[in-house]
Image: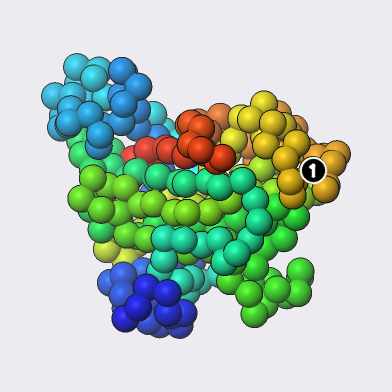
C-alpha cells in the first residue's frame, strides 16, 4: 500500500497490529542523556547506563488528546500538504523506559494546527474533507519517527503545541503534547504567514494544560536552513 494512500480506520488498525489510538495508555516518559545526546543516538544503552546516570529517564505527564484527534490518519512523513509556514522537521524518539533502548516499530501519530490556528478534519472549523498536518510514522531501527511539517500557529486559549500519541503492539502507551520555547515562537511569528495574526493570546506560563508538566515536554529545537529541527525522546513502558 502506498504510504500516501488514505487509510480507513480499520485499515490503519490492521496495519499497526490493532492500533487503538482512542485509548489512553501507561505514563509517558522523557529520556535524556547526561551529555545532551539521547540514548538512541549515543550508543549508551541498557540498565547499566541508567544506573550509572549516563542516561536518565524522567516521567513526563500524560496530557489530553484534545478535541481534534481523528483516527485513521495517513501513513506519511511529509504532512504539510502545501501549507505555508516556517519548515519544521520533527524527530521523535521512542525508547523503553526500563532500559532506555530504542524501540523499533512504534506507531507515532502527530497532529497540529496550521499557521492560522486551523485544524484539518473537523466540522467545527469546516475542514472535514482536508487532511493537512496529520500523519503516522513507525519508528526506525534507532527508535526515531520523522515528520516534515511547519511550525504550528496559535489559537485562542492555547499556547503553541503539537499533539502526539505513541502505540506499541496495539496499545496506546503515551498521549501527550509537545511544546516550544516562547522566545523562539516570538521570533518565528515575526515571519510570514504568522505575522498576519499578531497578538498571540496565550503563552506557556498561562496555558492550563502546559502548567501540568508541559515544561518536561518541550521540544529541543535547532536551526536548519530557513527552518528548524525539533527533537524529543519519549520513554514508554512496553
Front residue (pair 36, 59): 36
Q: How many marks?
A: 1
Looking at the image, is 122 positioned above or below residue 143?
below
Front residue (pair 173, 70): 70
Classify 10 Å Cα crowding around label 1: few (below 14), some (14-19), many (20 and above).
Answer: some
Image position of 145 (left or right of 102): right
Image position of 167 (left or right of 195): left
For the point 41% across and 60% down, the residue is 77
Front residue (pair 51, 12): 12
Residue 20 visible (yes or no): no
Residue 35 sits in which quadrant? top left
Front residue (pair 82, 159): 82
Residue 151: x %, y % from top left: 61, 46
In the picture of the structure, the residue carrying the numbered disc 1 is: 195
For the point 35% across and 52% down, the residue is 145
Residue 116: x %, y % from top left: 75, 55
Looking at the image, is 171 positioned above or below residue 104?
below
Residue 34 sits in which quadrant? top left
Amino acid at each position: 500500500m502506498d504510504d500516501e494512500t488514505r487509510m480507513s480506520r480499520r485499515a490503519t488498525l490492521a496495519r499497526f497490529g490493532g492500533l487503538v489510538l482512542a485509548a489512553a495508555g501507561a505514563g509517558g516518559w522523557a529520556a535524556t542523556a547526561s551529555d545532551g545526546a539521547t540514548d538512541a543516538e549515543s550508543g549508551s544503552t541498557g540498565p547499566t547506563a541508567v544506573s550509572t546516570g549516563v542516561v536518565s529517564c524522567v516521567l513526563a505527564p500524560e496530557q489530553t488528546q484534545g478535541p481534534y484527534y481523528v483516527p485513521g490518519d495517513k501513513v506519511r512523513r511529509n504532512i504539510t500538504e502545501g501549507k505555508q509556514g516556517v519548515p519544521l522537521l520533527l524527530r521523535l524518539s521512542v525508547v523503553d523506559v526500563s532500559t532506555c533502548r530504542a524501540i523499533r516499530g512504534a506507531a507515532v501519530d502527530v497532529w497540529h494546527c496550521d499557521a492560522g490556528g486551523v485544524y484539518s478534519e473537523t466540522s467545527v472549523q469546516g475542514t472535514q474533507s482536508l487532511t493537512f498536518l496529520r500523519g503516522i510514522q513507525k519508528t526506525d531501527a534507532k527508535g526515531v519517527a520523522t515528520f516534515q511539517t511547519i511550525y504550528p500557529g496559535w489559537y485562542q486559549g492555547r499556547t503553541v503545541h503539537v499533539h502526539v500519541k505513541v502505540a506499541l503492539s496495539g496499545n496506546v502507551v503515551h498521549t501527550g503534547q509537545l511544546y516550544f520555547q516562547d522566545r523562539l515562537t516570538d521570533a518565528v511569528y515575526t515571519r510570514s504567514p504568522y505575522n498576519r495574526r499578531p497578538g498571540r493570546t496565550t503563552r506557556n506560563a498561562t496555558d492550563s494544560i502546559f502548567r501540568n508538566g508541559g515544561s518536561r515536554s518541550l521540544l529541543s529545537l535547532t536551526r536548519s536552513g530557513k527552518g528548524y529541527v525539533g527533537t524529543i525522546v519519549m520513554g514508554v513502558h512496553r
